Image (tube, rainbow, N blue to C red):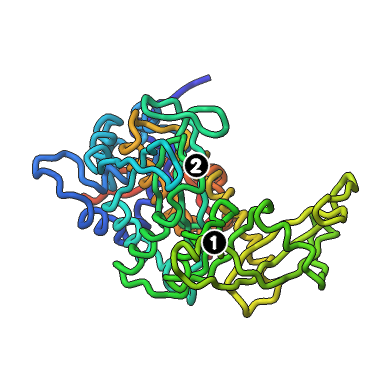
Amino acid sequence: MKIQNKKNISAFGGINYVFDYLSKSKIAEILESDLPALKKQSQYKWTDIFYSFISIYLCGGSCVEDLQNHLKSHFDNNPFLNLPSPDTLLKRFSELTEDTYKAKTKRGAFYHTCSNNNKLDNLNIKLLKKLGVFESDKLVLDYDNTIVFTEKSDSKMTYKRDYGYHPAVCTVNEEHVLHIQNRNGNCDPKAFQAEVLRDVFNLLEKHEISKPLHLRADAASYQYDVVKELVKNNVTFYIGCRNSYVERYFTQVKKWVPMKSSLNPTMEVGEIIITPFQRQAEIDQAESKSYRMIVKRCKNKNGQLNLLTGDAYEYRAILTNNFELTPLEVAAFYNHRGNMEKQFDILKNDFGWNNMPFSCLSKNTVFLYFSAICRNLYSKIIKHFSQVVRFLKPTYRVKKFLFRFIIIPARWITHSRQKQLSLYGKINFRT
């Protein structure tokens, strides 16, 4: 077998089209203007740092060290970026760190460590504006927590009996990360939710985003302080109820409507009006308000009777202040909240959340934000290239995008004093 070696051939020729698209979208201008100014003698700009970081995941890497171990030789002589070392990239990230703070819940005995990052909050929302995320008639927010397992020096034991962090995440329109508060692993999912949501609303107000807001959250958000904050900000909410708090109401539902469901053919939906949190409202010297409780039920598998309801059904309930939609419409809308688990899966497996690079909480918050920004941009990238390239769909994950578009041999050559990209293959552009 005869082998001929060619210098400066990159296996990831398709990534240059991504860099070109980001440059034309003026993403680099936002990075350079909103991130702290670097020294004049600095060899790398923020554009170099960010393009290198996003290329790790779009080229199939899983951690920052892949820049040196696997990608360095593929980015020689690339006109879009000057590839830094992993240490340089992490050093730049660490310069964006903001101090952590400790807080405890009203009834808690222990302080929890929390980490925000206002600089990256503002950068992220400006990039989302640039992507046109806030141009829709209404904004659908989803709030949830996830556990990121990691054995860093300051990580704590989570309720799943392993060490890690427990960030709170708010997404907008189901696929874009809007806000992150990183917390240590021993922080309860229901802790500080009202404070996090207040930060989200203040952030939107600061950037003059005044669209109607709809928020979905799970049963950990079934709290008086959370509902109070949502009502104060005129947010239409859909919150899962904790059965132990509301199961006494289930027998009051008189009318049940069948709901089409491939998973549960026996699913039925009903509704009643309830006035929750009366005791907390009295303590707060506030008026108790009534809301709709949408109740879903389906027959359980073992046929055993429930002692409280006297039937063989499993119940789930949703608290909402939306009095316009039908019970079936509310239930169907709330079911889309399950998309949060998909977003966490994408962030952890496609954009590096499972491989924290730093050994402290505040620095890893910076990493979480930059990874989330990469995920936000990827939604726009895959939608754009699915329109101009055959065999790509806007729903493809990074792995399929890598195999079908990024991986194509190419090298930069100089022709007529200009750099040109020479492909050793073919990209099936639409005609």
- The residue beneath circle 2 is 188
| Picture quadrant where residue 377 is located | bottom left
> Residue 95: x, y in percent?
22, 40
In the image, which is nearer the foreground, mark 2 or mark 1? 1
Say left or right for 229 vs 159: left
What kind of residue is marked 2? Asp
Which residue is depicted at the point 51% across and 61% down?
280
Judged from this view, the residue extending furthest toward the right is: 303
Q: Residues within 10 Å of mark 1 (few under 14, many from 20)?
A: few
Say left or right for 17 vs 297: left
Residue sitting nearer the eye, 37 or 284: 284
What kind of residue is marked 1? Arg
Q: Is residue 418 above or below residue 224?
A: above
Q: Is residue 83 above or below residue 216?
A: above
> Which label belongs to residue 101?
none
Mark 1 or mark 2, which is nearer the start of the sequence? 2
> Residue 341: x, y in percent?
58, 48
Residues under numbered marks 2 and 1 in contact, where contact means CB atoms less than 8 Å apart: no
- The residue beneath circle 1 is 279
Q: Residues within 10 Å of mark 2 (few under 14, many from 20)?
A: some
Q: Is residue 413 above or below residue 354?
A: below
